[in-house]
């Protein structure tokens, strides 16, 4: 086993002792390093991106990472202790799933780099994470997606022009206008009660 992968496995040992949020970040770092050495940079999206952009204020149960179809993915994941399951990878020692994610990412999306113990990991920008959540809210009417979009918006200084552009591209521009009004109310200290908040989020689409 090469020294780089041995270092990655040491990261996994630390992940087993870490908080759920840090566990996901450490595992993501180990996967990213293993694939980067083979010319492939995986990308964090979905729930894990939300966790990062809310500084752990929200945590999904899975590590949502686009691994793609690089020929070395199977080798790296297996050597890091993952087992291939239908539509996902599973690490039995860490009780952590990495679901298969679509390998085609919006080429117009912004990509940020976060450092996990000095190792770079790529993640979609907070604006794109908000758009992703609002699209899910529109498509499913599940208010949890609107709540996580709100958490992201209140945890980050968003680029309003870029956010509106991405909303237009995603076909949710009018919904975003209402969403931004809701965020502005929170920033003024005018937080609605939970039931009213859920109704207002559902009414966006």
Image: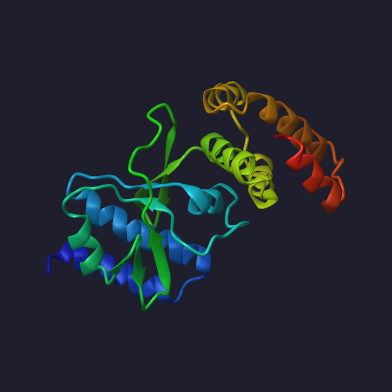
Q: Say which quarter of the image contains residue 108.
A: top left
Q: Height in image: 45 above or below 171?
A: below
Side of 103 relative to 59 (left or right) = left
Q: Say which quarter of the image contains residue 14.
A: bottom left
Q: Height in image: 101 above or below 9?
A: above
Q: How many marks?
A: 0
Tell me where residue 82 appears, x and y as whole percent.
29, 69
**Residue in the foreground of this view, choosing between 24 and 147:** 147
Tell me where residue 110 appears, x and y as whole percent.
44, 32
Tell me where residue 69 appears, x and y as whole percent.
23, 48
Tell me where residue 88 appears, x and y as whole percent.
35, 62
Q: Height in image: 205 above or below 66?
A: above
Q: Say which quarter of the image contains residue 59.
A: bottom right
Q: Say which residue appears at 37% left-offset and 57% top-offset.
A: 28
The N terminus sits in image quarter: bottom left
Colour theme? rainbow
Side of 71 relative to 56 (left or right) = left
Q: Height in image: 9 above or below 149?
A: below
Q: Say which residue appears at 60% left-offset and 23% top-offset.
A: 164
Q: Say which residue appears at 49% left-offset and 37% top-offset.
A: 125
The C terminus sits in image quarter: top right
Q: Say which residue appears at 68% left-offset and 43% top-offset.
A: 150
Pick out the residue farthest to the left. Answer: 1
């Amino acid at each position: 086993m090469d020294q780089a992968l041995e270092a990655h496995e040491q990261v996994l040992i630390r992940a087993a002792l870490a908080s759920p949020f840090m566990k996901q970040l450490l595992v993501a770092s180990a996967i990213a390093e293993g694939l980067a050495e083979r010319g492939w940079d995986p990308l964090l999206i979905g729930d894990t991106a939300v966790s990062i952009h809310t500084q752990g204020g929200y945590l999904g149960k899975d590590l949502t990472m686009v691994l793609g179809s690089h020929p070395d993915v199977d080798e790296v994941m297996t050597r890091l202790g993952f087992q291939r399951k239908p539509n996902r990878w599973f690490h039995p020692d860490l009780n952590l799933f990495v679901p298969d994610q679509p390998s085609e990412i919006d080429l117009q999306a912004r990509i940020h780099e976060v450092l996990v113990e000095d190792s770079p990991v790529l993640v979609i920008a907070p604006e794109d994470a908000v758009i992703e959540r609002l699209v899910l809210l529109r498509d499913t009417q599940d208010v949890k997606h609107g709540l996580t979009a709100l958490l992201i918006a209140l945890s980050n200084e968003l680029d309003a022009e870029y956010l509106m552009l991405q909303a237009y591209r995603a076909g949710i521009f009018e919904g975003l206008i209402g969403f931004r009004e809701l965020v502005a109310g929170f920033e003024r200290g005018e937080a609605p009660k939970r039931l009213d908040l859920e109704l207002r989020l559902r009414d966006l689409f």
